[in-house]
């Protein structure tokens, strides 16, 4: 089934992408939640017009995302956590912790746009990939230290 995404969907595509998904996924999840529409002739014409009108706005958003990516590349976050023997963490460090640490530095990023490359289980240095724009991705260095 061909659909047009109405918003960014992690692991699937970005807004205005025309993609093919399995019928059940499209009919039972994407369409009822308003995340997509069926890619028929009239919807494709409307999508083309929306893309044409949004192109200038998208260029500005991309520029803003690149500036934010430069800030994020410079930032190194230190997140304290409770630690047991051998440096093993009690609990876990999540993207919410990273978003809070960035907010403390004056950088606002939605936690849902972040993903750890590998889950922090011990103290040490980890990288978090941040999806800022369709073409712009940034990496933030997170240092997990004991309290």
Image (cartoon, rainbow, N blue to C red):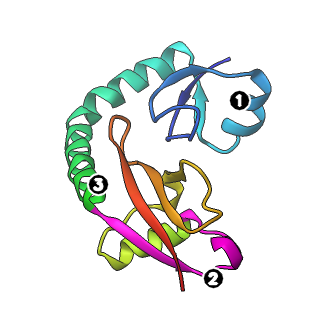
| Residue of label 2 | 82
- The residue located at (56%, 21%) in the rendering is 19
- Structural crowding at the residue carrying mark 1, measured as other residues with C-alpha within 10 Å and reported as few (<14), some (14–19) or many (≥20): many
Q: Nearer the viewer, residue 34 or 66?
A: 66
Residue 89 visible from this viewpoint: no
State the residue lying farthest toward the bottom: 147
- The residue located at (58%, 32%) in the rendering is 12
Using the rendered view, name the quadrant where residue 36 is placed: top right
Secondary structure found at label 1:
helix
User: Where are the magenta residues, as a range?
Assistant: 75-95
Q: Position of residue 130 (x, y in %)?
A: 42, 50
Q: Are marks 1 and 3 in contact (CB under 8 Å)?
A: no
In the image, residue 79 sits, relative to residue 133, either above or below, namely below
In the rendered view of the protein, which quadrant contains the N terminus? Answer: top right
Q: Are marks 2 and 1 in contact (CB under 8 Å)?
A: no
- The residue located at (56%, 16%) in the rendering is 40
In the image, residue 11 sits, relative to residue 65, either above or below, namely above
Residue 118 visible from this viewpoint: yes
Q: Position of residue 124 (x, y in %)?
A: 51, 64
| Residue of label 3 | 73
Q: Nearer the viewer, residue 90 or 95?
A: 90
Q: Nearer the viewer, residue 57 or 48?
A: 57
- Structural crowding at the residue carrying mark 2, measured as other residues with C-alpha within 10 Å and reported as few (<14), some (14–19) or many (≥20): some
Q: For residue 26, which numbered disc appears in the image? A: 1
CA–CA distance between discs 2 and 1?
A: 43 Å
Q: Position of residue 67 (x, y in %)?
A: 20, 52
């Amino acid at each position: 089934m061909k659909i047009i995404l109405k918003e960014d969907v992690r692991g699937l595509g970005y807004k205005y992408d025309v993609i093919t998904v399995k019928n059940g996924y499209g009919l039972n999840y994407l369409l009822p939640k308003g995340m997509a529409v069926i890619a028929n002739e009239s919807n494709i014409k409307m999508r083309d017009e929306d893309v044409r009108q949004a192109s200038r706005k998208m260029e500005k958003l991309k520029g803003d995302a690149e500036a934010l990516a430069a800030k994020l590349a410079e930032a190194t976050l230190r997140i304290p956590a409770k630690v047991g023997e051998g440096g093993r963490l009690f609990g876990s460090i999540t993207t919410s912790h990273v978003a809070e640490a960035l907010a403390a530095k004056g950088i606002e990023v939605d936690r849902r746009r972040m993903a750890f490359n590998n889950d922090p289980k011990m103290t040490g240095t980890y990288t978090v990939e941040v999806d800022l724009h369709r073409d712009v991705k940034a990496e933030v260095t997170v240092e997990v230290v004991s309290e």
